[in-house]
Amino acid sequence: MAVTTVEERNKACLDACAECQQACEACNYRCCAENPEMAACARLCLDCAAICALCVQMLSRGSRWADQVCRLCAEICEACAAECDKYDVDYCRACAEACRRCAEQCRQMASATA
């Protein structure tokens, strides 16, 4: 029987969180640089990027708290996706898509460990 590492078991969720973190950071930067009226979107993207980074850390080390962090991450990702959906710009659409993928993976991860 093959032994799987924590990273192998959590790869889909780790990848989705890392992608979401990057998309949120990019969206935040562009919201601030190009559209100052999008401050709420920028702030929510920062929160989302931070929780995604925390998920990557917790999942990578197999923390017993990872499932709870993943549940919270899914909620924040959904809120971020909804906020980004308000704006018809490419970086917000990309961020919203990444957030939805991350939310789905985080929910799956949290339910698998519950």
Image (cartoon, rainbow, N blue to C red):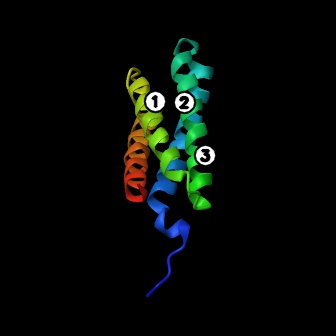
Above or below, 39 relative to 110:
above
| Quadrant (top left, top right, bottom left, bottom right) of the N terminus | bottom left
User: Which secondary structure, mark 3?
Assistant: helix
Q: Residue at x 59, y 31 (%)?
A: 46
Q: Secondary structure at mark 2?
A: helix
Q: Crowding near pointer 3: few (<14 within 10 Å), some, many (20+)?
A: some
Q: CA distance from mark 2 to mark 1?
A: 6 Å
User: How far is the residue under mark 3 from the one under mark 2?
Assistant: 14 Å
Residue at the limit of the structure toward the top, as seen here: 37
Determine whether 21 is above or below 60 in the image: above
Instruction: Name the amino acid type tagged 1.
Output: Cys
* 36 or 53: nearer the viewer: 53
x and y percentages locating residue 50 in the rendered image: 61, 38
Q: Quadrant of the C terminus?
A: bottom left
Residue beneath disc 2: 45
| Nearer mark to the viewer, of 3 and 1 | 3
> What's under tag 2, amino acid-wise?
Cys
Mark seen at residue 54: 3
First reached walking from the N terminus: tag 3 or tag 1:
3
The reply to whether the C-beta atoms of the residues labelled 2 and 1 are less than 8 Å apart is: yes
- Residue 33's tag is none
Q: Residue at x 58, y 20 (%)?
A: 34
Of the residues shown, which amino acid type is indicated by label 3?
Leu
Callout 1: SS: helix
- Vertical relation: 25 (above or below) 69: above
Q: Determine the CA span between mark 3 and mark 1.
A: 16 Å
Question: To which residue does mark 1 refer?
Answer: 80
What residue is drawn where x is 43% and y is 46%?
A: 102
